[in-house]
């Protein structure tokens, strides 16, 4: 055995397993979201167990999954359109502002 090869050359490290699992989850993510949407439309009662806190966690997981599929080229292409980027950014800032007004001022 040369070049630092060991007896378990086919074994993967933890980092490689994390990358493989992450790629699999990221690749099949649209499928899971589609299945969840169709199930929710056809049998809404199957989601009665979802509480407010769980819906926040679910949305966080969805956003994480969407972010995992972004590449540097995607981000650079978004930044290359400053008017559209500003429009979306300002809309999101307004939503955050309205949320804080409703949560902390109104209630």
Image (cartoon, rainbow, N blue to C red):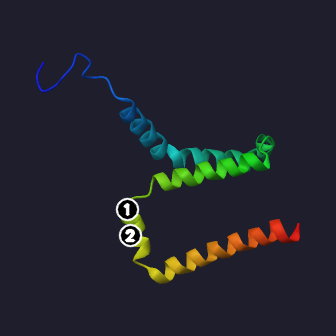
Given the current orientation, which residue lies at the most extreme bottom position? Answer: 83
Disc 2 target residue: 76
Quarter placement of the N terminus = top left
Q: Is residue 60 above or below residue 82?
A: above
State the SS at label 1: helix
Disc 1 target residue: 72
Task: Work out how far the residue at label 2 is from the one at label 1, CA to CA, in angstroms.
Answer: 6 Å
Q: Quadrant of residue 48?
A: top right
Residue 68 x/y as whole percent = 47, 52
Given the current orientation, which residue lies at the most extreme right position? Answer: 107
Q: Is residue 35 above or below residue 8?
A: below
Given the current orientation, which residue lies at the most extreme top position? Answer: 7
Residue 89 x/y as whole percent = 57, 75
Residue 11 x/y as whole percent = 31, 23
Q: Are marks 2 and 1 in contact (CB under 8 Å)?
A: yes
Local packing at callout 2 (Cα closer than 10 Å; few below 14, some 14-19, many 20+) is: few
Residue at 65% over, 46% down:
36
**Image check: 96 left or right of 27?**
right
């Amino acid at each position: 055995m040369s070049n630092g090869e060991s007896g378990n050359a086919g074994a993967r490290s933890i980092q490689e397993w994390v990358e493989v699992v992450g790629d699999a989850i990221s690749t099949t993510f649209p499928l899971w979201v589609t299945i969840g949407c169709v199930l929710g439309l056809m049998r809404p009662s199957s989601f009665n167990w979802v509480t407010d806190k769980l819906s926040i966690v679910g949305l966080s997981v969805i956003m994480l999954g969407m972010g995992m599929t972004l590449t540097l080229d995607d981000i650079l292409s978004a930044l290359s359109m400053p008017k559209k980027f500003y429009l979306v950014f300002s809309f999101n800032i307004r939503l955050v502002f309205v949320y804080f007004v409703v949560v902390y001022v109104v209630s």
